[in-house]
Amino acid sequence: MTHQNSAQSSARPPRPRSPHFPPHNAPRVWFITAGTSPTAIALARQVLDHGDYVVAGVVPIEFEKRESEDFRVFLEDVKKTERWRERLRVVGLDGSQCQSAVAEAVEAFGRIDVLLGSTSEAVIGAVEELAQSSRTISLVQETFETNFFANVNIIKAILPVMRQRKNGHIVMLTGITGHLGTPGLGMYCSSQWAIEGYCDSLAYEIAPFNVKMSIVQANMEVNVLTNRMTSVPPLLEYSQAENPAPLAREIFSGLLDKLDRVNNPTAFGDDKSPTDSTSTTSPDGMIHEPSTGDLLSSDTVTSLYPPLPQAVKASLIAETVHALTAIGGHDNPPARHIIGFEGVTAVKEKLKTTSEELEDFIEVSQAVDIGPDGERSAPVVIDQGDS
């Protein structure tokens, strides 16, 4: 009977976990960049419901676009919820507004306890594909402006506030792409590595002021599929027939096609495969529009927001939001947190490979002494005894 009960219980789906908020004596003030992103909206809902305060930074131009509909719904919910209404402040946040946004946040709530840097955009294309034209070359700089400098600028603006209070927590949302290179995402990965190197160095500088730093690495899909992605025209040399590497273009084209099947199943034929990149008419007279995934193979630079259904969106970001909620403002937060079993496994494999390579080359990496006659001598080993 016990075995049967155990088998039945193991077959049940896991119960949703409630976020474990770190203990604190007073409500925290969160400053969240990229406030219109699904992750930021979900996190804001969680912490507002917990009694915290939220300053949501938004780029004014993006706020006016159709893609921020989720944020508009969120604002309507805030207006209807009395316990949220006075706890949210929306501020304009672009390259020239960091100082004023921080000043507005401090004026509204008196301080900033947690900064979540989550500004991100993926550029899809092989390195050679990014060198095709002046437009594709400019995307390299734009990627670093968004993924690196935007986060650096808001950190620099907030640091004096946290340093003067000798309290604060900076959380940078990156991805396992900060550890692992991905074919077709070279610029995106390099910008992630750059911001992580910046934050790793900064952590030592701000530690004496009791300002903590945490890097949170979500799985690749979280940041790529919940923010704008831009694709450059493909080169024939990097087609699947010529280059069998699992390029990001094919990976995300497949994911976007699956989303199309969910959002618009009538746009696909009986074989459940996406239509071509041009509209076609089926025997039943129905016009089939090109799938979203086809846009990543366009012969022009193309930007889009992945059309995530609400259920898919909630499931995709749930674990990340849970981790951010638990880590943000914690007295002893982790310096780095990798979200998801698959991400941890991938990083472990990368570190294992690196360790093995270091062992292979340890002999040639050792320092040697060069004598006056030009001959090498063995490295000097100092016996430190039991010290």
Image (spheres, rainbow, N blue to C red):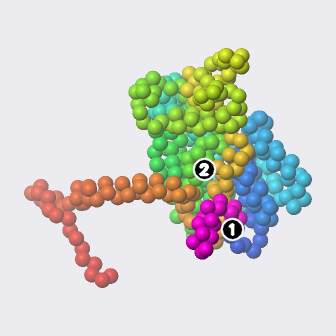
Q: Which element is circle 2 on?
A: helix
Q: Which mark is residue 60?
A: none
Q: Residue at x 32, y 57 (%)?
A: 356
Mark with earlier residue (1, 2)? 1
The percent coordinates of residue 340 (x first, y second) are 56, 57
Quick one: which residue is furthest to the left in this view?
373
x, y percentage for residue 211?
62, 66
Task: State the quadrant of the N terminus.
Answer: bottom right
Q: Is residue 10 magenta?
A: yes
**Pointer 1: residues within 10 angstroms few (<14), some, or many (20+)?**
few
Give whichever of 14, 20 is nearer the camera.
14
In the rendered view, does 226 fall on the left or right side of 63?
left
Indicate which label's residue lies in the foreground, 1 or 2. 1
Inspect the image, locate mark 2, and give the three-letter code of the amino acid beneath it. Answer: Val
Which numbered circle lies on residue 20? Answer: 1
In this rendering, the answer to whether 186 lies above or below 15 is above
The tag on residue 152 is 2
Marks 2 and 1: in contact by CB < 8 Å?
no
- Residue found at x 64% / y 57%: 319
Is 19 in front, or is 34?
19
Q: In the rendered view, does 385 fall on the left or right side of 378?
A: right
Disc 1 marks a residue whose amino acid type is His
Number of callouts: 2
Q: What distance separates the C-alpha of mark 1 from that of mark 2?
A: 29 Å
Residue range corresponding to the magenta coloring:
1-19
Q: SS for tag 1?
A: loop
Position in image of residue 212 (x %, y %): 60, 65
Q: Is residue 61 above or below residue 22?
A: above
